[in-house]
């Protein structure tokens, strides 16, 4: 299974400037439904939900910060 991670855009950078995190949602049911040979695209969390969430609150379950993937891409 190949998952395409969206690159951070201007809205993500603005949220990071305010100290907020924007989550990426993985298509977890796609593997069990279609098998290992699929191409899936991860979706971003809504900008407004990320903006209105308090800084101290963690991301909801099943989401990962979009900038953590950018750091992984830079290492490779």
Image (tube, grey):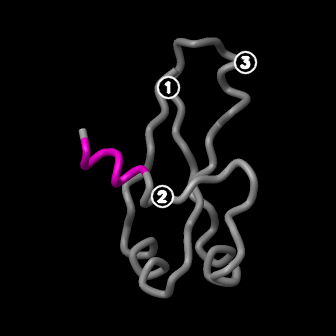
- In magenta, the rendered stretch is 69-75
Question: Residue, x 67% and y 26% (percent of image)?
Answer: 30
Which of label 1 and label 3 is nearer to you? 3
Q: Position of residue 68 (x, y in %)?
A: 44, 55
- Quarter the C terminus occupies: top left
Residue 70 position (above or below residue 29): below
Q: Nearer the viewer, mark 3 or mark 2?
A: 2
For the stretch drawn in magenta, what is the main secondary structure?
helix
| Residue annotated with mark 2 | 66
Residue bearing the label numbered 1: 39
- Residue at (34%, 53%) from the top-left corner? 71
50 and 61: which one is in front?
A: 61
Which label number is shown at residue 70? none
- The percent coordinates of residue 45 (x first, y second) are 62, 62
Identify the residue shown where x is 73% and y is 18%.
33
Name the N-terminal-most of marks 1 and 2.
1
Q: Quadrant of residue 8?
A: bottom left
Choose between 67 and 56: the one closer to the eye: 56
Report the number of numbered marks.
3
Q: Quadrant of residue 29?
A: top right
Q: CA distance from mark 1 to mark 2?
A: 19 Å
Secondary structure beneath dot 1 equals: strand
Residue 55 x/y as whole percent: 63, 82
Residue that mark 3 sits on: 32
Q: Compute the Cα span from label 3 to label 2.
A: 24 Å
Q: Is residue 24 above or below residue 15?
A: above
Disc 3 element:
helix
């Amino acid at each position: 299974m190949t998952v395409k991670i969206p690159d951070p855009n201007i809205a993500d950078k603005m949220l990071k400037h305010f100290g907020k995190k924007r989550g990426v949602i993985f298509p977890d049911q796609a593997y069990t439904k279609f098998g290992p040979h699929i191409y899936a695209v991860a979706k971003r969390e809504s900008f407004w939900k990320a903006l209105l969430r308090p800084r101290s609150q963690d991301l909801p379950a099943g989401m990962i910060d979009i900038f953590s993937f950018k750091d992984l891409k830079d290492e490779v």
